Amino acid sequence: CFIKFTKVERTTDFKLLCIIYPKKMCQPTSEGGKFDYEFGGPFGTLATIIFLPIVTMLLTYWASIGHIDFEKILDTTSSCQSDIQSMLATFANSEALCPSCNNPWVLATCAFVVFVWFLFQVLLERFLPCDLVQGAPLPDGSGNRLSYRINGHLAFWVTVLLLNIAWPRWVEIPEGGQTKFVLVFGSAPMTWLHDNYSTLAFVTILWTIALSTYLYFKSFGKGLLLAVGGNSGNPIYDFFMGRELNPRWGSFDWKEFCELRPGLIGWLLLNIAMLSKQYERLGYVTGSMIFVNVFQGLYVWDALYQERAILTTMDITTDGFGFMLCFGDLAWVPFTYSLQARYLVNHDPHLHWTVLLAIVGVNMIGYLIFRGANGQKDAFRRDPDSPEVSHLSFLKTKRGTKLLTSGWWGMARKINYTGDWIMGLSWCMVCGFNSIVPYYYAIYFAILLVHRSIRDDHMCQEKYGDDWNKYKSIVQYRFIPGLF
């Protein structure tokens, strides 16, 4: 069973996918009034809830040692069935899966840091200047729209500046034979994030479980708008998918906030921490470490800069906010997407500058495709008659929707996915070719996007009917023009 996240059109639209299940369980059906289960139904979602945290912890461990290794996780000396319990106990008690569990002080400190980090981002969202933007019409047919505070880009820069030049600390200064404490400002001790990387991942996972549990029980309040896909009546499935469509405290929207703020900006800070640790170890920073920070930093910045674009994505308009999105946004993204930087701290391949330059070219190609395609689509949605997109041809469907058939979207139906994957591949390539661990992203993302495109195709077929067949006859390729 492959447990994955997919990004729908934007860097932040993360979706959990469990790909290999029996066909009857994977395919939604409405025959006989049955609920349209996704992701393997209750069995698949339960397996995902159990194993996804384990996968996350294993990835953080393997990135630190530079290779896949079960020797310190499983008791490999046990071969008899009578020793299975011993093997499982070793697995559960390993430092890889429960880091610092023998040190309550470290656990408590990391839990406090995660809580303060989340609260800090909430305060920025609440009190920084913002644009109040209306979301898509709610699916209840009322025509009502929710308002969102869009200031993620400003929160991004406030966070970066605070941690780099405005981190407060007290220092002792001798004066007249006495010592006094003075408040000064400088850089935050970023290497602490590296030193407690796995423990931070562990307590963040616990936080996502707690938050998902709260959101599940909150969804049983009166008068709340529920997500169709998370209202099956099965508690495990609904816990995973999310019952309530837009859980809020007043005007504070839990889903939109978690989609971008704590996890995505946290990913950037973890990368910076790895860079700082490499400098501490080596006395210099390698080209690979610089480029992975630049590549992924641009990716994060782009997502925050384009924050309002997520308001029309499936995550916001259709899916409930349950374990699937909560875990993906807050735990999976920061602690598995930063694995390349974590790997480079101790296992940098010291690539030649010509190789690095070629990888930069790969990343630029991916970014140009990704940003060009999404920018063109967004511009067309806003105003099809604007000069930048008025020359594009389109297919007008019976629903009144216009499907682009030229420009980027005339090349392939999921051309933005192609650019996204190429960028991700460049992140892995800066780690060299000595280990498969940093390439996990490119491998799972390829499988994931193919599966996602199949799911999208099914949804569009139901939505547009014969018009979708006509559209596919015009735009024949899915990812790569002329090939696939």
Image: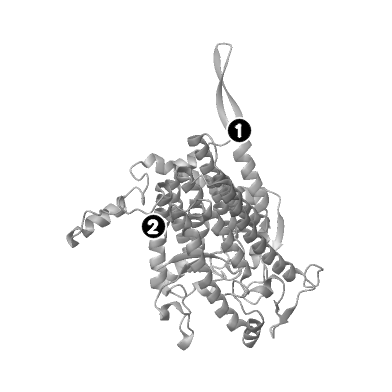
Image quarter hosting the C terminus: bottom right
In x, y percent, where is residue 339? 48, 51
SS for tag 2? Answer: helix
Position above or below: 30 against 424:
below
Residue topped by disc 1 = 186
Q: Quadrant of residue 404?
A: bottom right
Q: CA distance from mark 2 to mark 1?
A: 37 Å
Identity, as a three-letter code, of the amino acid under mark 1:
Gly
Left or right placement of residue 110 versus residue 100 in this view: right
Q: Quadrant of residue 399?
A: bottom right
| Number of other residues with Cα within 10 Å of mark 1, as a class: few under 14, some 14 to 19, many 20 or more | some
Position above or below: 243 against 119:
below
Q: Residue at x 60, y 33 (%)?
A: 186
Residue 54: give its label: 2
Proximity of marks 2 and 1: CB atoms separated by less than 8 Å: no
Q: Is residue 116 visible?
A: yes
SS for tag 1? Answer: strand
Q: Is residue 12 visible?
A: no
